[in-house]
Image (spheres, rainbow, N blue to C red):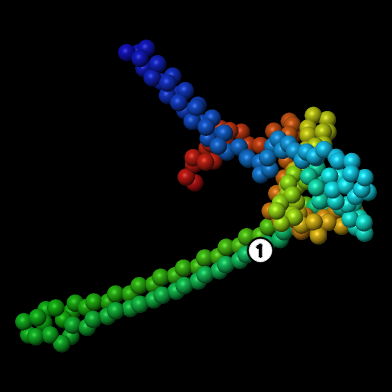
């Protein structure tokens, strides 16, 4: 019986550890941009026909009076990241209610005169006061160069890029993806991040410094499980 109890206790400990591991895995932050860079598939060009003409359609369209701006798959443009978000909210609620009910038993028949000294007086008071506030302020500035992954049917460009900076034993990753309107691209092949649709901006790090800043999996479990 003692050995069976030891085996049961060991199984319980294994189940608890597995549960802790699952909670820790579920609490791990997820990236908002695809981790691995998407492959850029360059469109294949057809065989060039020597027809003696100066203009060759197979070589692509190059406007005579326009500068060279990104408009094809594989072209490069620079995103000027200037994001600033500020929000605040404040709520306050106050309620008060009071009521009083009294019954006088002075006028009663003779056989109920003994109840004259008994009266009924009921009163109630209810007060509530609640308030709350929240504020947030985020600023992100920088530049990142991206590539055109796809030219959509309406001419918009789906772009994505990643920048990796390694410092000592740590690494910083900046990832960006979104949809760019070619008309928003300047002559220097730049575009503001505020003009990018469905923008996904991610700035994360890897290394022992970022590992030290993360809460341990056991502590995350107790923060998740505790009701207080």
Residue 101 as seen in the image, left or right of residue 205: left
Locate the N terminus and report the quarter of the image it occupies: top left
Identified at 35% across, 72% down, the residue is 124
Identify residue for label 1.
88
Identified at 49% across, 30% down, the residue is 19
Q: Residue furthest left?
A: 111
Residue 135 as seen in the image, left or right of residue 228: right
Vertical order, 137 against 224 (above or below):
below
Point out residue 78 in the picture as x, y percentages from the top left corner. 84, 49
Point out residue 96 in the picture as x, y percentages from the top left corner. 44, 74
Can residue 21 be seen in this snapshot? yes
Q: How many marks?
A: 1
In the figure, residue 219 lies in which quadrant?
top right
Identified at 57% across, 33% down, the residue is 25
Residue 213 as seen in the image, left or right of residue 61: left
Vertical order, 196 against 26 (above or below):
below
The one of 155 and 60 positioned closer to us in this rendering: 60
In the figure, residue 39 lies in which quadrant?
top right
The one of 27 and 72 positioned closer to us in this rendering: 72
Identified at 55% across, 69% down, the residue is 92
Q: Residue furthest bottom?
A: 107
Point out residue 75 in the picture as x, y percentages from the top left corner. 83, 45
Can residue 37 be seen in this snapshot? no
């Amino acid at each position: 019986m003692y050995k069976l109890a030891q085996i049961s206790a060991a199984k319980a400990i294994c189940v608890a550890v597995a549960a802790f591991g699952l909670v820790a895995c579920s609490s791990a932050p997820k990236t908002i941009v695809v981790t691995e860079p998407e492959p850029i598939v360059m469109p294949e060009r057809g065989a060039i026909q020597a027809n003696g003409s100066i203009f060759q359609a197979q070589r692509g369209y190059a406007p005579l009076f326009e500068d060279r701006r990104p408009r094809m798959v594989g072209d490069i443009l620079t995103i000027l990241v200037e994001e600033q978000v500020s929000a605040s909210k404040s709520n306050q609620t106050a309620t008060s209610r009071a009521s009083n009910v009294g019954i006088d038993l002075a006028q009663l028949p003779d056989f109920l005169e003994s109840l004259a000294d008994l009266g009924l007086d009921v009163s109630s008071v209810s007060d509530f006061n609640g308030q709350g506030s929240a504020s947030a302020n985020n600023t992100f500035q920088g530049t990142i160069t991206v590539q055109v992954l796809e030219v959509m049917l309406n001419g918009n460009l789906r772009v994505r890029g990643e920048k990796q900076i390694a410092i000592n034993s740590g690494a910083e990753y900046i990832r960006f993806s979104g949809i760019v309107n070619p008309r928003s691209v300047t002559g220097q092949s730049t575009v503001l991040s505020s003009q990018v649709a469905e923008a996904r901006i991610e700035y994360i790090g890897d290394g022992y410094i970022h590992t030290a800043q993360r809460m341990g999996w056991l502590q995350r479990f107790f923060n998740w499980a505790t009701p207080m």
